[in-house]
Image (tube, rainbow, N blue to C red):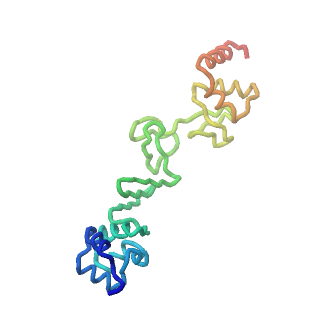
Amino acid sequence: MENSLTALEKVILKSKGVTDEMLVKFTELGITSKESFSVVGDAKTLSDITGLSPENASAIMEWAGVQSAAPTAGANVTTGPGGTVLSTDGQKIVVEDSSVIKCTHCDHKQPHDYTSGDLCPNCGKQAEPMTNCYWCYNVGSGKFCRSCGAEYVKNLDYEIAVLLKREGVSKREIARELAAMLDSEKETRLTQLRSGRY
Protein backbone atom coordinates (compact mmCIF):
# COMPACT_ATOMS: atom_id res chain seq x y z
CA MET A 1 0.00 0.00 0.00
CA GLU A 2 1.74 3.14 -1.16
CA ASN A 3 -0.32 5.63 0.83
CA SER A 4 -0.72 4.75 4.52
CA LEU A 5 0.00 6.02 8.00
CA THR A 6 3.64 5.86 9.07
CA ALA A 7 4.75 3.49 11.83
CA LEU A 8 5.19 6.43 14.22
CA GLU A 9 1.70 7.80 13.45
CA LYS A 10 0.22 4.35 14.11
CA VAL A 11 1.99 4.10 17.49
CA ILE A 12 0.72 7.57 18.47
CA LEU A 13 -2.84 6.70 17.41
CA LYS A 14 -2.71 3.43 19.39
CA SER A 15 -1.63 5.43 22.47
CA LYS A 16 -4.79 7.48 22.01
CA GLY A 17 -7.10 4.45 22.03
CA VAL A 18 -7.09 3.30 18.37
CA THR A 19 -7.10 -0.49 17.84
CA ASP A 20 -5.60 -2.43 14.91
CA GLU A 21 -9.11 -2.91 13.50
CA MET A 22 -9.69 0.83 13.62
CA LEU A 23 -6.39 1.45 11.83
CA VAL A 24 -7.66 -0.75 8.98
CA LYS A 25 -10.92 1.21 8.99
CA PHE A 26 -8.95 4.50 8.88
CA THR A 27 -7.20 3.26 5.71
CA GLU A 28 -10.55 2.24 4.17
CA LEU A 29 -11.94 5.72 4.91
CA GLY A 30 -8.90 7.39 3.33
CA ILE A 31 -7.29 8.59 6.57
CA THR A 32 -3.74 7.86 5.46
CA SER A 33 -1.78 10.68 7.15
CA LYS A 34 -1.91 13.18 9.99
CA GLU A 35 -3.10 15.80 7.49
CA SER A 36 -6.14 13.64 6.60
CA PHE A 37 -7.72 14.51 9.94
CA SER A 38 -8.17 18.13 8.77
CA VAL A 39 -10.57 16.81 6.10
CA VAL A 40 -12.59 15.07 8.86
CA GLY A 41 -13.01 18.48 10.51
CA ASP A 42 -13.88 17.86 14.15
CA ALA A 43 -13.86 15.27 16.93
CA LYS A 44 -17.61 14.54 16.70
CA THR A 45 -17.38 13.66 13.02
CA LEU A 46 -14.35 11.43 13.66
CA SER A 47 -16.27 9.68 16.44
CA ASP A 48 -19.33 9.22 14.21
CA ILE A 49 -17.48 7.71 11.23
CA THR A 50 -15.05 5.48 13.14
CA GLY A 51 -16.89 4.47 16.31
CA LEU A 52 -14.23 5.99 18.57
CA SER A 53 -15.31 7.39 21.94
CA PRO A 54 -15.72 11.20 21.99
CA GLU A 55 -12.76 11.51 24.41
CA ASN A 56 -10.43 9.49 22.16
CA ALA A 57 -11.62 11.30 19.03
CA SER A 58 -11.00 14.65 20.74
CA ALA A 59 -7.48 13.58 21.79
CA ILE A 60 -6.66 12.45 18.22
CA MET A 61 -7.96 15.68 16.67
CA GLU A 62 -5.95 17.71 19.18
CA TRP A 63 -2.81 15.71 18.26
CA ALA A 64 -3.54 16.28 14.57
CA GLY A 65 -3.76 20.03 15.21
CA VAL A 66 -7.44 20.32 14.27
CA GLN A 67 -9.58 22.53 16.50
CA SER A 68 -12.93 21.11 17.52
CA ALA A 69 -15.86 23.37 16.55
CA ALA A 70 -18.19 22.18 19.32
CA PRO A 71 -17.54 21.80 23.06
CA THR A 72 -15.91 18.45 23.85
CA ALA A 73 -17.53 15.67 25.83
CA GLY A 74 -16.17 17.08 29.12
CA ALA A 75 -18.04 20.36 28.62
CA ASN A 76 -21.15 21.08 30.63
CA VAL A 77 -23.50 23.71 29.22
CA THR A 78 -26.46 24.80 31.30
CA THR A 79 -28.91 27.60 30.75
CA GLY A 80 -30.99 29.13 33.51
CA PRO A 81 -32.90 32.31 34.30
CA GLY A 82 -30.62 35.31 34.14
CA GLY A 83 -27.77 33.77 32.19
CA THR A 84 -25.87 30.93 30.60
CA VAL A 85 -23.09 29.01 32.35
CA LEU A 86 -20.48 27.23 30.23
CA SER A 87 -18.12 25.02 32.20
CA THR A 88 -15.13 23.50 30.40
CA ASP A 89 -11.99 22.02 31.92
CA GLY A 90 -12.57 23.74 35.26
CA GLN A 91 -13.20 27.16 33.70
CA LYS A 92 -16.55 28.80 34.32
CA ILE A 93 -18.09 31.53 32.20
CA VAL A 94 -21.27 33.23 33.38
CA VAL A 95 -23.29 35.37 30.97
CA GLU A 96 -26.02 37.38 32.66
CA ASP A 97 -28.72 39.49 31.09
CA SER A 98 -29.24 43.15 31.92
CA SER A 99 -32.21 42.48 34.21
CA VAL A 100 -30.02 40.88 36.91
CA ILE A 101 -29.65 43.03 40.02
CA LYS A 102 -27.08 42.18 42.68
CA CYS A 103 -26.84 43.39 46.27
CA THR A 104 -24.18 46.09 46.70
CA HIS A 105 -23.20 44.58 50.08
CA CYS A 106 -23.00 40.78 49.50
CA ASP A 107 -23.25 40.50 45.66
CA HIS A 108 -26.25 38.15 45.96
CA LYS A 109 -28.57 38.04 42.91
CA GLN A 110 -31.98 39.54 43.74
CA PRO A 111 -35.30 37.80 42.95
CA HIS A 112 -37.19 38.69 39.76
CA ASP A 113 -39.93 40.57 41.65
CA TYR A 114 -37.32 42.89 43.21
CA THR A 115 -38.02 46.64 43.25
CA SER A 116 -35.67 49.46 44.27
CA GLY A 117 -35.48 49.84 48.02
CA ASP A 118 -36.19 46.16 48.87
CA LEU A 119 -34.01 44.34 51.38
CA CYS A 120 -31.64 41.61 50.21
CA PRO A 121 -32.93 38.13 51.18
CA ASN A 122 -29.31 37.00 51.76
CA CYS A 123 -27.84 39.69 54.06
CA GLY A 124 -30.94 41.69 55.09
CA LYS A 125 -29.49 45.06 54.05
CA GLN A 126 -30.97 47.36 51.42
CA ALA A 127 -29.77 45.78 48.16
CA GLU A 128 -29.52 49.12 46.34
CA PRO A 129 -29.26 51.94 48.87
CA MET A 130 -31.30 55.00 47.93
CA THR A 131 -29.11 58.07 47.44
CA ASN A 132 -29.85 61.78 47.13
CA CYS A 133 -28.56 63.55 44.04
CA TYR A 134 -26.59 66.69 44.90
CA TRP A 135 -27.25 68.14 41.43
CA CYS A 136 -31.00 67.77 40.77
CA TYR A 137 -32.08 66.65 44.30
CA ASN A 138 -33.86 63.48 43.08
CA VAL A 139 -33.58 60.22 45.01
CA GLY A 140 -32.52 56.98 43.34
CA SER A 141 -30.38 53.87 43.44
CA GLY A 142 -27.29 52.77 41.54
CA LYS A 143 -24.12 54.72 40.79
CA PHE A 144 -25.57 57.53 38.67
CA CYS A 145 -28.69 59.68 38.90
CA ARG A 146 -31.29 58.56 36.37
CA SER A 147 -32.58 62.13 35.98
CA CYS A 148 -29.45 64.20 35.38
CA GLY A 149 -26.62 61.65 35.10
CA ALA A 150 -24.59 62.93 38.05
CA GLU A 151 -22.44 60.35 39.81
CA TYR A 152 -23.80 59.67 43.29
CA VAL A 153 -21.57 60.39 46.26
CA LYS A 154 -21.61 58.87 49.73
CA ASN A 155 -24.39 60.16 51.96
CA LEU A 156 -21.72 61.55 54.30
CA ASP A 157 -20.34 63.69 51.46
CA TYR A 158 -23.73 64.97 50.26
CA GLU A 159 -23.50 68.38 51.96
CA ILE A 160 -19.99 69.02 50.64
CA ALA A 161 -21.13 68.03 47.12
CA VAL A 162 -23.96 70.60 47.31
CA LEU A 163 -21.42 73.17 48.53
CA LEU A 164 -19.11 72.42 45.59
CA LYS A 165 -22.06 72.82 43.21
CA ARG A 166 -22.75 76.29 44.71
CA GLU A 167 -19.06 77.17 44.21
CA GLY A 168 -19.40 76.44 40.47
CA VAL A 169 -17.65 73.07 40.23
CA SER A 170 -18.96 71.09 37.25
CA LYS A 171 -21.21 68.05 37.69
CA ARG A 172 -18.51 65.68 36.40
CA GLU A 173 -15.78 67.03 38.66
CA ILE A 174 -17.61 66.97 42.01
CA ALA A 175 -17.27 63.20 42.61
CA ARG A 176 -13.57 63.34 41.60
CA GLU A 177 -12.85 66.26 43.93
CA LEU A 178 -14.58 64.51 46.82
CA ALA A 179 -12.58 61.32 46.20
CA ALA A 180 -9.34 63.34 46.25
CA MET A 181 -10.20 65.28 49.44
CA LEU A 182 -8.66 64.28 52.76
CA ASP A 183 -10.97 63.70 55.72
CA SER A 184 -9.53 66.79 57.43
CA GLU A 185 -10.45 68.94 54.41
CA LYS A 186 -13.98 67.57 54.43
CA GLU A 187 -14.31 68.26 58.15
CA THR A 188 -13.12 71.85 57.65
CA ARG A 189 -15.65 72.46 54.88
CA LEU A 190 -18.48 70.95 56.94
CA THR A 191 -17.55 73.12 59.92
CA GLN A 192 -17.59 76.25 57.75
CA LEU A 193 -20.91 75.24 56.18
CA ARG A 194 -22.60 74.58 59.52
CA SER A 195 -21.27 77.73 61.14
CA GLY A 196 -22.91 79.81 58.40
CA ARG A 197 -19.69 81.14 56.82
CA TYR A 198 -20.87 80.10 53.35
Q: Position of residue 158 (x, y in %)?
A: 62, 27
Total marks shown come to 0
**Toward the viewer: 164 or 138?**
164
Which residue sits at x=36%, y=73%?
A: 44
Report the residue that reaches farthest toward the right: 168
Position of 181 compared to 85: left or right? right
Quarter of the figure that contains the N terminus:
bottom left
Quarter of the figure that contains the C terminus:
top right
Report the residue that reaches farthest toward the left: 20
State the image quarter where residue 169 is shown: top right
**Toward the viewer: 55 or 196?**
55
Residue 182 vs 48, above or below: the answer is above
Q: Position of residue 151 (x, y in %)?
A: 63, 37
Which residue sits at x=53%, y=52%?
A: 98
Position of 15 compared to 120: left or right? left
State the image quarter where residue 143 is shown: top right
